[in-house]
Image (cartoon, grey):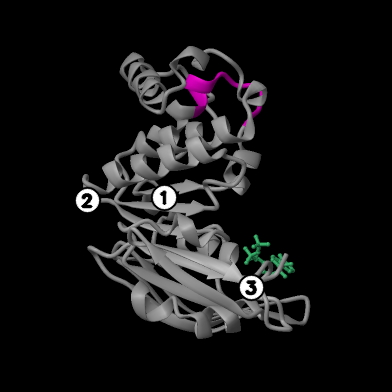
Amino acid sequence: MIHMQSISLRREERDILSGVDLHMEKGQHWVILGRNGSGKTTLLEMMTGYMFPSTGTVDVLGYRFGACDVREVRKEIGYISQSVIEKLSLSDPVWEIVATGEYAFLRFYQAIDENVRLKAIRLVEEVGLGHMVNQSLGTLSQGERKKILLARSLMSNPKLLIMDEPCAGLDLHEREKLLVDLGRLTDRGLMVVYVTHHLEEIIPLFTHVALLHEGRITAAGPKEEVLSAEALSQAYDWPVEVEWVDGRPWIRAVAKSGGVAR
Ligand SMILES: Nc1ncnc2c1ncn2[C@@H]1O[C@H](COP(=O)(O)OP(=O)(O)OP(=O)(O)O)[C@@H](O)[C@H]1O
């Protein structure tokens, strides 16, 4: 479903990504981990056609970027990220923001079909924010905006859901609810690619993990193989220990002198 081959990206005399090969197949759900600035968001922006590599090829859902209409591909992709929130109009009502997802528009400049309006309202209710449907996006909290983006991305029945730190800014209760919702969504046959800084968000539905370090993939494959203390210590440039509880990995930073960091 996603094939990135020999990807590199050079900006301002710097290699942001180098020699990236990633192959994500149907039935898999991926998490991408790495330090701040390692290139995770850049990779996601390439998967959604918002950025193009300096060299290499990106194939998503059978389309090759650079040789297809990016708008058509985006209709099949739900993208949840701060960068999308920043592109939306904070003064538009929540239901209208969600409705734009039907056409992969950022904003409407024409009358909105009544069926599209009703579908948008239903999805806002589904993510638990029905009481805010007429409020403007700018009046919502960061966590509520993430949920609105999830509702928006479901408007077009996407085949692929790409999520960049969707749980950032959510409290524990809201985080767990969103992760449960994600489990429900994958029942529809949707593939998820998920970036996070928090290993405990790697719930059992995720099958594969890629580790990025300074723009290079240092490990990629089934999560049980990739999430070793050794590979993660290398990715984070810090010694860590990993413990699995109920099918979820938990990471603990170890003080460089030997004890647990406080
Ligand atoms: N247009 C650009 N021009 C120059 N440098 C850029 C550009 N876009 C991204 N970068 C740099 O590329 C690197 C990777 O950025 P990216 O946002 O992909 O990292 P990230 O792994 O998502 O980081 P974080 O975890 O902090 O969100 C960063 O050092 C960033 O400053």
Can you give x and y, in whole percent of width and height, for residue 57 in the image?
44, 77
**Camera-side mark, 3 or 1:** 3
Taking the spot 35% from the left edge, 14% from the top edge, the residue there is 114
Can you identify the residue that label 1 sits on? 74
Mark 2 to mark 1 CA distance (whole Å): 17 Å
Query: Which quadrant of the structure image shows residue 209?
Result: bottom left
How packed mark 3 is, by other alpha carbons closer than 10 Å (few <14, some 14-19, many 20 or more), is many
- First along the sequence among labels 2 and 1: 1
Viewer-nearest residue: 107 or 46: 46
Relative to 14, residue 253 above or below? above
Can residue 48 be seen here? The reply is no
Q: Position of residue 34 (x, y in %)?
A: 58, 71
Using the rendered image of the protein, determine whether residue 237 is visible from the camera's viewpoint: yes
Amino acid at circle 3: Ser
Q: Which residue is mark 2?
A: 189
Residue located 52% across and 16% down the image:
132
* The residue stretch that appears in magenta: 89-97
Q: Who's the residue at 35% across and 75% down the image? A: 224
| Nearest the eye: 72 or 123 | 123
Of the residues shown, which amino acid type is indicated by label 1? Arg
Q: Is mark 3 within 8 Å of ligand 1?
A: yes
The residue nearer to you, when weighing 184 against 80, is 184
> Gap in Å between the C-alphas at discs 3 and 1?
25 Å
Disc 2 marks which amino acid?
A: Gly
Residue 126 image position (x, y, % from top left)? 35, 25
Which of discs 2 and 1 lies nearer the camera? The answer is 2
Which callout, 3 or 2, points at the residue further toward the start of the chain? 3
Quadrant, the C terminus: bottom right
Give the mark count: 3
In the displayed structure, 231 sits above or below 203; it is below
For disc 3, the marked residue is: 38
